Image: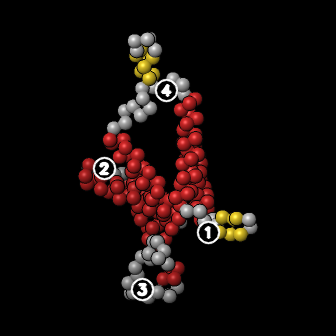
Amino acid sequence: NLFVGLMAVTIACLCSAFAGVYFEFVLKRPTNDGGEARAPVSMWMRNVQMAFFSICIAYINMVRDSDRGVTGLVDENNDPVIKPFMHGFTGWVYVVVMLQAGGGLLVAAVIKYADNVLKGMATGVSVVTATFFSMFLFGTSLSIQFAIGAGVILVSVYLFSNDIPAMCKGKVKQDEHVEMSPMLPK
């Protein structure tokens, strides 16, 4: 159903935008200590706080799921053999876990030192870049819809990075070389 799909995507986009803006608000807001404003809590402390709640939720789900890891085999006492907690984890799984953790820290750093809009732009450019390289490396074929979407992303990044209204009003000479403004503050 097209309507249900569009509504689901719209709700997902709104939830993602709200979560990004709220995360930026939480990360950058000053803390109050008895009415006296202090600097915001460090990014590392916020990550520890969020990880604590994630660990609590995962532990509750692990305890609640009592038949976790039953292999269907029995031991010499006819008790079911239960798989160990990290059964099936290989070196590649640890690599993926480390990459995901590093990506989370990188997102937190981008939000702390830039803003949520820049994070969205960087995500869009990374998708376009990864797809561009996969086209050459793996022979991925691209559709016209992807080409239009990639064009919209790249034009939006250009417009976001440059002061176009100032150029149109004549404050910047047309023949002057305009560089992209730096993305991160100094």
Pointer 3 or 4: first along the chain: 4
| Amino acid on which the number 1 mark rests in the picture | Ala
CA gap, disc 3 to disc 2?
Answer: 38 Å
Q: Is residue 60 left or right of residue 82?
A: right
Instruction: Identify the residue at image location x=37%, y=36%.
Output: 89
Q: Does the rendering let one see residue 148?
A: no
Q: Which residue is mark 4?
A: 68
Tag shown at residue 174? 3
Disc 2 residue type (three-letter): Ser
Q: Nearer the viewer, residue 165 or 81?
A: 81
Q: Does residue 38 appear to the left or right of 102 in the view shown?
A: right
Residue 86 located left or right of residue 20: left
| Front label number (2 vs 1) | 1
Q: Which residue is mark 2?
A: 141
Which residue carries the number 1 mark? 39
For the residue labelled by badge 3, is the local secondary structure a helix, a strand or a loop? loop
Q: How many marks?
A: 4
Are there few (<14), some (14-19), or many (20+) residues within 10 Å of tag 4?
few
Indicate which disc, 3 or 1, sits on the residue closer to the N terminus. Answer: 1
Q: Secondary structure at mark 2?
A: loop
Residue at x 61% of width, y 69% of height: 39
Give how far across and how far down residue 130 sits, in percent: 34, 55
Tell me residue 119's x, y (percent): 49, 62
Which residue lies at the image location 53% right of the left edge and 32% below the top edge? 62
- Distance from disc 4 to disc 1, alpha carbons, whole Å, reads 44 Å
Q: CA distance from mark 2 to mark 1?
A: 49 Å
In this rendering, the label closer to the viewer, 2 or 4 = 4
